[in-house]
Amino acid sequence: MQSIVLYQIPFSHFCDKVRWGLEFYSLPYEAVNFTGRQTPAYIKAPREVQKLTPLIEDPNNDSFFLSDSTPILLYLDERYGNKPKLFPVNKKDEIVQYCLTLDSGLGLYARRLAYLYIISEHPAILSALVDFRYDKSSCNDWKSYFLGLAGSCVIISRVGVDRIQEEHIFEKTICVLDEIQNDIQGKEYLFDNQFTAADLTLTSLMAPLSLVPGIHEKYRVIFDYCDRMRKLHDPKKDYKSNAQRLYETRPKKSFPIVRSIIWLLLSIFLYPLQFLFAKDLKKKPELQYPSNDAEKKAKNDVRVLKWASKIESLKFFLRSFCIYCLILPKQLEHVQNEEKKLLSKE
Ligand SMILES: N[C@@H](CCC(=O)N[C@@H](CS)C(=O)NCC(=O)O)C(=O)O
């Protein structure tokens, strides 16, 4: 059998799902990292295939391309899953729906909240989205910091980190987590007393939320459940993304007073610019791959980013930088207040 190619952003929790699925079935695979629009698969794959990671190419099936983590797991299960099956036949439809619901909700919320913390605390981690060095062991240098700012600008606009409060992302996350916490109480597995794609999906998609301190503390039961799933069923038992590792070992912010003064000056300087972009900021974002068949495909909240000329890209980065300086601190304050409220409830 030839290796299946997995096109991935190594720290993406959706890509982790597929990596885990491939290893669970002991399938040979080759991981190829996302390199922006130059990602080879984006050029090779048929037009109708969504150009997001994870994306697989199966040379054993006429170079078949498939994107979207749950449909990929289902494909692997139907084609290669023999004895341990991630979608046991008697519960298949129910498990598919469970996974798609998590992909369309929890997975998107967790991504936005984790990015908010990364961008606010150590944006240099996102330099990997610009220089594509995903396995760096440290990013505490100035180059990474500036590339990280560029990566942060793209992420803010791409996945809507600036609209966490307006779209009630924290509150929605809590609703989903309360439901999950009730559901797993006293259970060994989510479905049928066996490990399935539902447990795998929950475990992968929860991971970014460990960066949100209040959630990590409040929902210890779910995190413990996920740790147990990893230990028992992931061939990479201690899997942790490099982004999470870099975040956990980030240096303490030095010179807090000097920093505050620089931020204050920057904010004063940028303040008038937000009126220039006011119309743009109010516009409803256009989504890139809205799902019109949520039964088969997950919903997504990635937005279309267009910049054809140098002037447009300059305008894009300036606008995103204004958001970074003026709007993200408010979003973080909102989330931290909600975390405090959450922890103060018994
Ligand atoms: N619902 C999709 C989510 C795919 C997705 O949003 N992928 C992100 C990484 S987490 C991506 O490819 N981002 C690159 C980009 O926005 O261009 C799945 O389950 O695979």
Image (spheres, grey):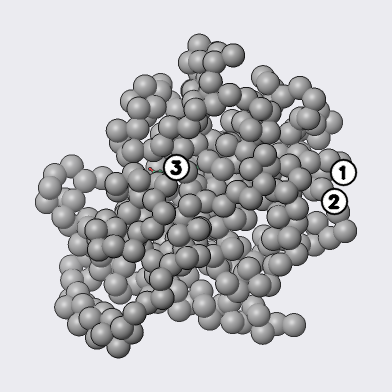
Contact? badges 1 and 2 (CB < 8 Å): yes
Q: Measured from the top left, where is residue 284 in percent x and y?
A: 37, 56
Q: Residue at point 31% right, 83% down?
A: 255
Q: For residue 323, what is the image quadrant?
A: bottom left
- At 32% across and 39% down in the image, what residue appears? 36
Provide the secondary structure element on which disc 2 rests.
loop
Instruction: Say if mark 3 contacts mark 2, CB within 8 Å.
Output: no
Mark 2 burial class by Cα count in 10 Å: few <14, some 14-19, many 20+:
some
- State the residue at coordinates (48%, 77%): 334
Task: Give the residue type that dot 3 points to.
Answer: Ile
Which quarter of the rendered picture does the C terminus lie within?
Answer: bottom right
Amino acid under disc 1: Asn
Residue under label 3, please give it.
Answer: 9
Give the crowd class for mark 3: few <14, some 14-19, many >=20 residues within 10 Å. Answer: many
Tell me: residue 189, above or below residue 324: above
Vertical side of 39 occupied by 170: above or below: below
Q: CA distance from mark 1 to mark 2?
A: 6 Å
Alpha carbon separation for disc pair 1 and 3 = 32 Å
At label 2, the amino acid type is: Glu
Q: Which residue is mark 1?
A: 193
The picture places residue 167, in percent across and down from the top left corner, at 49, 64
- State whether residue 153 appears in this view: no
